[in-house]
Image: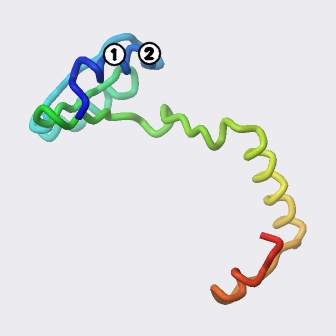
Amino acid sequence: MQSLCEFFRKLSSNPPIQSSIMIVISPTELRNNFKKYFDLANKERVIIQRGTAEIFELVKRERIDDPYFENPENVNALKRSLNQAKEGRVKKLTSMDDLLSKSSF
């Protein structure tokens, strides 16, 4: 179980995108003021503290980093696959057996 102090130490190594302000609220506060906190999440860190053991962060989708798409090899592989699909170079699979029997995947 992670203590609140450890959590905030980790947060300080990942500063928010537009602001260094962070707000900690309860689930009840979030439930009573959804719009307010969704709007704040655009520019501030909104932390929801549920009891002593659970901590969540309200994050707008555009602010989420996905390490898969940061890897140039993965991005290039996706681009190649999209081009192959556009060119009609695809294989139709109709069953799980088809998928398992294709060694080129």
The quadrant where residue 56 appears: top left
Q: Nearer the viewer, residue 92 or 36?
A: 92
- Give the residue at the far front of this rendering: 1
Give SS at disc 2. Answer: loop
- Image point 14% across, 38% down: which residue? 27
Relative to 4, is 99 on the left or the right? right
If the image is split into quadrants, where does the C terminus sit? bottom right
If the image is split into quadrants, where does the N terminus sit? top left
Q: Position of residue 66 (x, y in %)?
A: 56, 39
- Image point 45% across, 16% down: which residue? 18
- Image point 14% across, 41% down: which residue? 31
CB within 8 Å, label 1 to label 2? yes
The quadrant where residue 14 appears: top left
Residue located beneath label 1 in the image: 9
Position of residue 68 relative to residue 39, above or below, is below
Q: Position of residue 12 (x, y in %)?
A: 38, 14
Q: Amino acid at mark 1?
A: Arg
- Image point 88% across, 72% down: which residue? 89
Label 1 packing within 10 angstroms: few (<14), some (14-19), many (20+): few
Residue located beneath label 2 in the image: 13
Q: Position of residue 36 (x, y in %)?
A: 23, 30
